[in-house]
Amino acid sequence: MEMKEMLYIVTIAEEGSISRAAEKLYMAQSSLSQFLQQYEAELGTKLFRRTSTGVYPTDSGRVVLDHAQKILQQYHLMRSQVSDIEGLISGHITLGISTFRGMYMLPKVMRAFYQKYPHIHVDIIEANSMALEEEMMRGKLDLALLVLPLSRLKSDTELLVRDEVILVTSPDHELMQAAKYREDGRLYVDLADTASYEYILSDRDTILGHIARKLFTEAGLQPVSRNTNITAPFAAAMARQGLGLAFTYRSCVGDYPEAAYLSVGEEGVWLDLALVYPAGSYRSLATREFARIFRESLDD
């Protein structure tokens, strides 16, 4: 099996659909279907069970898939080690980051990195923290920016910064009348004061969505919300226009004159952001250099 064919098998399994896998691989669905049929004929066995809801690996398929994943991981490791020997002249890094944080934190880092290492390609996988943990467990990431503590992943972590979960709304929202100043000069409100106002919430499977619902439960509150599956950037944009209250991160506060930002309680709600690496795996020079530039960008 050639390297690209192993990638085909892994992608079909991950997507659970030949059409979605073909789209991800930038190839025609007919070509991918033909490859799979030919390869199954060569092996003399079916690798995937076709159903009305998608395709699923057979017992034989799981064996092939396991070997394909391991070989692709070894190939990635080999490329990293060869690049190190060449001294950062070329190379490849796969980075995982959420859409929201990526919008605010990553462009500056990428610019600084490419100015110094223009021939090292950074491949970005954009997903929420929980999905990125899955990608790390599959060996598809060299590093990721994740919230601690990790849900299931056991990896090497490097604490970057403490971030605050805050509320965003418009300056003329009625809630602002209940806002108070804390010692650092920033405004805060007690969560109970927000109970009668409408929220715009992210999905439960996102960090913000999970934290929001946990805060409500601990406070014994039932939030008013007609939108409970909105992405964090979308929710914040709607809240800035006075359409409700949304949770966001202090690190993702933009220069919006129409926005008001409030801490949740006088002590605030905090979380740790870390760079996360696959546990016990080889960490390339390019990966280490990218992490260094990321750290420095936070100090600027």
Image (cartoon, rainbow, N blue to C red):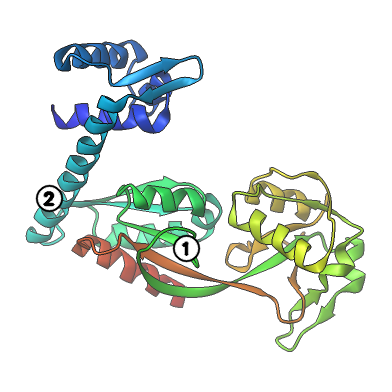
Q: Which residue is mark 2?
A: 78
Instruction: Report the quarter where the C terminus lies.
Output: bottom left
Residue 218 appears left or right of 254: right
Q: Which residue is at 72% across, 57% downward?
A: 213
Residue 51 badge: none
Characterize the local packing of mark 1: few (<14), some (14-19) or many (20 or more) Cα atoms within 10 angstroms.
some
Residue type at numbered disc 2: Met
Amino acid marked by disc 1:
Leu
Find residue 9 and report its horizontal and vertical position in percent: 27, 27
Q: How many marks?
A: 2
The residue positioned 16% from the left and 54% from the top of the image is 80
Q: Is residue 216 above or below residue 244?
A: below
State the CA–CA distance, disc 2 to disc 1: 28 Å
| 221 versus 55 height, above or below | below
Report the disc number at residue 150: 1
- For the point 21% across and 35% down, the residue is 68
